[in-house]
Image (cartoon, helix red, strand yellow):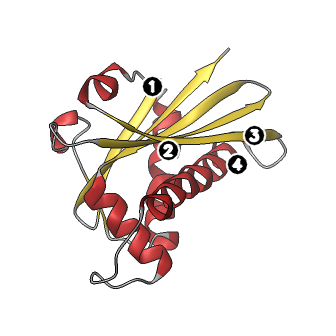
């Protein structure tokens, strides 16, 4: 799984830096980097092909607010609504998953990315997530976790 974590880290950092326009720093791979009593946002990009799996992105409101404002060129005074935030998170999962699959398995291997979902979650749900490989980092100082699970 080390190769998968390296690819996930490389792609996650690239997407956050180049697309989301964030400064990215390393962060410990532990839930303690998050505010554990605050709600979490989770987005999952499911892929099918030679094998199936999903890329999961976990964050909290400060990261998601920053991401959404960067993507939509909004000032900190402008109000964000929930659909904007959910759309930004799904798009982040989409870009990470597509780039991860190409980086890890090459452009010749074909995958479909048919389903993207995002939702709110609490601490217990996040603690129950057990991706095969995961990385944590901080985008503009706010933590984010990216995980990959392979099925079969």
Alpha-carbon span between mark 4 and mark 3:
16 Å
The front one of 132 and 144 is 144
Find out whether the residues at labels 2 and 1 contact each other: C-beta distance under 8 Å.
Answer: no
The front one of 135 and 56 is 56
Residue position for label 2: 8
Of callouts 3 and 2, the N-terminal one: 2
Q: Nearer the viewer, mark 4 or mark 3?
A: 3
Residue 128 visible in image: yes
Left or right of 18? Residue 125 is left
Of callouts 4 and 3, the N-terminal one: 4
Find out whether the residues at labels 1 and 4 contact each other: C-beta distance under 8 Å.
Answer: no
Residues packed near mark 4 inside 10 Å, few (<14), some (14 to 19) or many (20 plus): some
As helix, strand or loop, the secondary structure at mark 2 comes to helix
Quadrant showing the C terminus: top right
Find out whether the residues at labels 4 and 3 contact each other: C-beta distance under 8 Å.
Answer: no
Query: Image height check: is 11 above or below 124?
Result: below
Residues packed near mark 3 inside 10 Å, few (<14), some (14 to 19) or many (20 plus): few
Residue position for label 1: 131
Residue 41 locus on image (x, y percent)? 38, 44
Left or right of 37? Residue 78 is right
Of callouts 1 and 4, the N-terminal one: 4
Residue 25 visible in image: no
Residues packed near mark 1 inside 10 Å, few (<14), some (14 to 19) or many (20 plus): some
For the point 48% across and 74% down, the residue is 71
For the point 60% across and 23% down, the residue is 150
Q: Nearer the viewer, mark 3 or mark 2?
A: 3
Query: Image height check: is 2 above or below 112?
Result: above
Of callouts 2 and 1, the N-terminal one: 2
Q: Which mark is residue 102?
A: 4
């Amino acid at each position: 799984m080390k190769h998968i974590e390296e690819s996930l880290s490389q792609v996650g950092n690239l997407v956050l830096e180049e697309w989301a326009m964030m400064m990215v720093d390393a962060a410990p791979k532990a839930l303690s980097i998050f505010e554990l009593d605050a709600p979490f946002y989770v987005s999952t990009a499911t892929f099918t092909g030679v094998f199936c799996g999903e890329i999961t992105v976990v964050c909290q409101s400060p990261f998601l607010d920053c991401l959404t404002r960067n993507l939509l060129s909004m000032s900190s005074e402008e109000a964000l609504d929930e659909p904007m935030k959910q759309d930004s998170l799904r798009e982040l999962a989409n870009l990470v998953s597509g780039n991860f699959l190409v980086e890890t398995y090459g452009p010749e291997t074909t995958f479909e990315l048919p389903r993207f979902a995002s939702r709110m979650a609490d601490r217990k749900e996040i603690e129950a997530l057990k991706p095969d490989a995961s990385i944590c980092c901080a985008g503009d100082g706010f933590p984010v976790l990216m995980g990959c699970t392979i099925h079969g």
